[in-house]
Amino acid sequence: MKLSTHRSTLRNLILAAGSGTLLLAGACGKNSSEIGDLRRNLGNMLGLVDEIPAREAFLMISKEALLHIISTSIDETHDVSDSVAGVSVTATGRTTGKVGINMIPDETQARFDAIIDLSTHLEIAGQHRPQSDIEINIVAVANSTSRTTKSFSVNLERAKGFDPQVTADTTLEVTGLEVNASGWFAGMKRRRAMEQTQATIARELPTQRANLEDRIAGEIKSAVNERAGQFLLNFNATLVKTFREWFSDTGYLPGKQVFQTTGDALWFSAVPDSQINGPELGFKAPRRDEGFVGDKISPLMLGISENAMEHAVEKALGGKTMPLAAVSQALVAAGALAPPSLWSTIQYSNIMATFPANKPVRLKFRDGKLHVTVHFEAIRQGAIGQAPSALELTYEPRLADDRNIEFVRVGEARVVGGPASPEANFLLSLVQTTINPGLHGKFLLPFPDLSGVIPALKELRLDFVRIEDGWIRLGASFDAIKNAGNTPADMPSRG
């Protein structure tokens, strides 16, 4: 039996075993995510399952979404001045075309080619007077088809473009020639001028065609570079700069971050250190239909694991001490809590809360809900101290509309732990007097509007928000993509 057959048989056994363990999940007290981890680890350990590399966060921009961002309508008219057979001419041209995209798979950076196919039609007319009594009128038609390839790469430093490559095929044909003469021997002068002009056309037309083709290619290059430069400026100012400054430079995302491309998408991923081999990122880029993206597919998807969010909060709050009133202030800033009274603000301003250095906030994405537990290592007012305690809140996220995410509160805030004596339970007092009475039943988280720098993002619409298996995932698409029938789809069965 061939090795590949062995591997196929063993893979089927592993998948079957994984399916069998699901039947025992209730008896073993394990949830589906734990069973999935067991199955995944077993397959990876034996090297038999092409598993999805672990990730902590991802942004996926599909090929069609990226094309929508960079694409532009091409239907332009323009005036051209040139010379045909020694005659100065003017021409009116029309250029039409379309933009395509080719994703280049790369695991260390994102790479793609913008492909611009153009057709240019020129109607050329001119008049020439070699001497005062001779007038030459010429009409010509030129047609040019071209393909321009502009390559781009994206990493955490910047997005950049490369010099476009243009291939063109141009025809140039003189469709009308008229020579008029006046004065003595007008007929002879006209015939002689016609013969000379025809000879010049026969001799010079191939050169003129080549010159025209070079000129069209040069103008295309210039136009593509100008538009690509604006796109790169905006792309760097939004996506690349944001991800570098928010996640890479600050360390808010765990592990390493990288841009990648597959045949159908551009990816930004945060990868745990355990998935990195040596100085290079030793993992493959994902596919859109792999499990960690969830059970819905949209042209744009964003996913963040509970571990990544806990890591970010730990970077911001771990080991820090601040007024206990800052808890209610944070809820007010999020829109979840009505502003407390002035007396409440003063009452709790001199009570100091210290967060633990590790995991000050625990986040659990389970059963379609976000469970938040804020831990306090100590809460003190002068000499009076409160034992370690925690504040628990639960929300259910859903779409309010295609631009806003709505967080619906489930139950009231709850205090866990703390001292036996009620007079020293500052956190419980804050919850009872300020937080629970002022908590809104829901609050909105608006989707940021980036259309000021990338106009195409004005059409961006949210498709879904989902919580499942330790992740929160968002899906979005563009109006034009939706209208073309590419709506979010359920994931195909992965067996």
Image (cartoon, grey):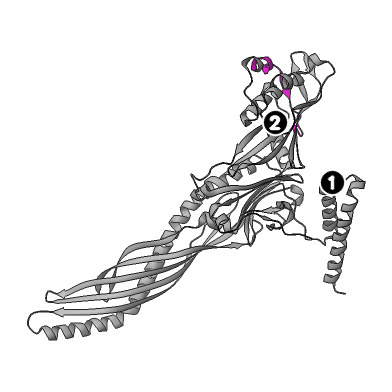
Q: Looking at this rendering, what residue extends furthest in the left direction?
A: 184
Disc 2 from disc 1: Cα separation: 30 Å
Residue at figure coordinates x 79%, y 15% from the top left: 424
Residue 197: in magenta span: no
Provide residue 150's location: percent of width, then percent of height: 51, 62
Residue 360: in magenta span: yes
Q: Is residue 87 left or right of residue 210?
A: left
Q: Is residue 485 above or below residue 407?
A: below
Q: Looking at this rendering, what residue extends furthest in the right direction?
A: 27
Provide residue 132's location: percent of width, then percent of height: 12, 74
Provide residue 263's location: percent of width, then percent of height: 63, 62
Q: Is residue 4 above or below residue 437?
A: below
Q: Is residue 409 left or right of residue 2?
A: left
Q: Is mark 2 in CB contact (under 8 Å) with mark 1?
A: no
Q: Residues within 10 Å of mark 2 (few under 14, many from 20)?
A: some
The amino acid pointed to by label 1 is Asn
Q: Which residues are magenta?
A: 345-361
Q: Quadrant of residue 4?
A: bottom right
Provide residue 140's location: percent of width, then percent of height: 30, 75
Q: Which mark is residue 311?
A: none
The number of discs equals 2
- Give SS at disc 1: loop
The amino acid pointed to by label 2 is Leu
- Give SS at disc 2: helix
What residue is disc 1 on? 31
What residue is disc 2 on? 317
> In the rendered image, which quarter contains the C terminus?
bottom right
N-terminal label among 2 and 1: 1
Q: Quadrant of residue 357?
A: top right
In the depicted view, which residue is nearer to us: 372 or 412?
412
Q: Is residue 338 above or below residue 259?
A: above
